[in-house]
Image (spheres, helix red, strand yellow):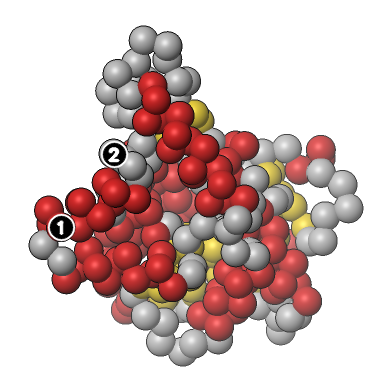
Amino acid sequence: MSRVVLITGGSSGIGKSVGEFLTKKGFVVYGTSRNPKKITNHPFKLVALDVNSEESILNAVAEVIIAEGKLDILINNAGMGITGPIEDTPTNEMRKVFDTNFFGAIDVMKAVLPQMRKQQSGLIINVTSIAGYMGLPFRGIYSATKGALELVTEAVRMEVKNFNIKVTNVAPGDFATNIASGRYHTPVFENSAYKKVYQENLDLMDAHVDAGSNPIKMAEAIYKIINTSQPKVHYKVGDFMQKFSIVLKRILPDKMYEKLLMNHYKL
């Protein structure tokens, strides 16, 4: 029997690329969207799911299990971006991003784990970010949400191992997707102490996304993980320098690494 995959945030970007790739490989794929009826000619099935609603999550997971009788793989991909100086960014907007990227991902894991325990098998892949390995200026809240999910992944992985459930995470670098248009941008306030440098960095971030890698690389990496009998705790997918930046953070003195980042962001 084909394995059944649920991909949160499967209507566009990385989620759509991964779902389309896995469908071609013979998996039964369900993606999620808050409003699937608005999306036509999608390459795989979509169910309604809002990661900020526990009821919506439980209904979507139940819909897949009722239709297929099982759920083998969860790819926790839904997320949103946020940019801005910490001082200028509204705290309620920070909470919204944590609710989506962190608590939303946790609630989806909690919803699928009972079925995976019942099956005595399952795989959960949390999509985080290379940004989660470092506090990036003007992206500090986004970095924090993804870093927090990395640590929770480590914890859950150990908690569910005895049920033959495997948990891992994949941290992508910059990919050419629509994340820049969907993220919350703190306005560049006229009277902000960060006005000039923040605007310059907004332009830099958007350029990085536009010049990012093809999302098919994430699809290929996830397919390889699915077919690995004992997945590692962490995977990174991106260009050499993005992945090497994590190595540098590990081996360089903190202040030296901070200086490298500040030079990169022209601070």
* Residue type at the position of mark 2: Leu
Residue found 32% across the figure and 79% down from its top: 162
Task: Answer left or right for 184 relative to 230.
Answer: right
Query: Which residue position holds label 1?
Result: 256
Q: Residue furthest bottom?
A: 229
Residue found 49% across the figure and 52% down from its top: 108
In the drawing, what numbered circle is on residue 267?
A: 2
Q: Judge by depth and name the residue closer to the eye, 233 or 65.
A: 233
Task: Answer left or right for 28 relative to 104.
Answer: right
Is any atom of residue 216 visible in this view? yes
* Residue type at the position of mark 1: Met
Percent x, y of residue 246? 30, 66
Residue found 44% across the figure and 73% down from its top: 240
Contact between marks 2 and 1 (CB within 8 A): the answer is no
Percent x, y of residue 253? 11, 62
Percent x, y of residue 40? 87, 47
Q: Judge by depth and name the residue closer to the eye, 135 or 59.
A: 135
Query: What is the C-alpha distance between the residues marked 2 and 1?
Result: 14 Å
